[in-house]
Image (cartoon, rainbow, N blue to C red):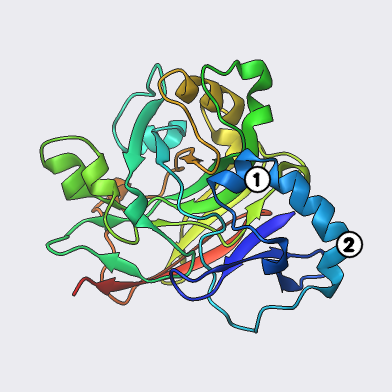
Amino acid sequence: MKLIRKGNLGAETPGLLLQDSREVDVSAFGEDFDEAFFDSSGIDRLQEWATTHADTAPEFPSGMRYGTPVARPSKIVCIGLNYKDHAEESGLEIPREPVIFFKATSAFCGPNDNLIIPRKSEKTDWEVELAFVIGKRASYVEESNALDHLAGYVLHNDYSEREFQIDRCGQWVKGKSCDSFAPVGPWLVTPDEIEDIDNLGMWLTLNGKTVQKSNTSNLVYKIPFLISYVSQFMTLLPGDIVSTGTPPGVGLGMDPPLYIKSGDVVKLGIDGLGESTQTAVNAS
């Protein structure tokens, strides 16, 4: 299944993208796609409901805004330097263990919402990433059964303000958590829809020019390992998002570095997970 949420900010309605490309409102199912939904086998129950009700569910109006495909998670966990060639372009060694950092949930936004360049920002950067959504509480999970805790996959642009992240004191989180810095979607795609998660093309363009082009086969640490690893340090709750890192081609790695300015248009996509577009605007 492909789960969607559509509508104005803060008033999104749950829905499904069907095999025939119709986008239907599943409000009649009676639940939003939040922690309680995932924690109660919501995807299985929704699949059963859709078998008899999806064909008659009302369609969303054309052009309606995409919200995030899941309601706000308890946390957004990110993995840094998880593509060998991205670490090289950053002048850094492949970490002997995954680098973990957070994005504030207030950065979470719809896939096509505007990118808000923070006040005093000079180094706002892009990062196309494969992310996954936790479907079942995960604590001290073994890698062998890690995928039992998976709800599905989403497209994520892990925006970063490099001066806030690197040049100023403290942790990466303050360069990762500005408003609009975590556009996710358009869909949550369940694992059965993806033939091989470790072989998906991914790309990002800036003003029509391709700057990132890679494949999920280049991930250093794969998803089962990441679920197990992160769960050794914190409990992952249903609906939580884990973003797996970005390939090379970020602005920081260019010579000279290139950063986003107001009016720039960023587009990105991953095979099977859809595409998203953000237009940059300055913070008011």
Residue 247, position in %: x, y?
Answer: 46, 42
Question: Is 259 or 171 nearer to us in this picture?
Answer: 171
The disc at residue 144 is: none
Question: Is 14 or 213 nearer to us in this picture?
Answer: 14
- Quadrant in the rendering for residue 165: top left
Mark 2 crowd level (few <14, some 14–19, many ≥20, 10 Å Cα): few
Cα separation, mark 2 vs mark 1, equals 32 Å
Which amino acid type corresponds to the residue marked 1 in the rendered image?
Answer: Leu
Considering the image in quadrants, where does the N terminus appear? Answer: bottom right
**Location of mark 2 (residue):** 52
Q: Residue at x 40, y 20 (%)?
A: 233
In front: label 2 or label 1: 2
Does 138 appear above or below 254?
above
**Location of mark 1 (residue):** 200
Of pointers 2 and 1, the one earlier in the residue sequence: 2
Q: How many dots with numbers?
A: 2
Which amino acid type corresponds to the residue marked 2 in the rendered image?
Answer: Thr
Q: Residue at x 62, y 49 (%)?
A: 201
Q: Please state if 13 lies on the left or on the right of 79 as rendered.
A: right
Q: Residue at x 71, y 63 (%)?
A: 16
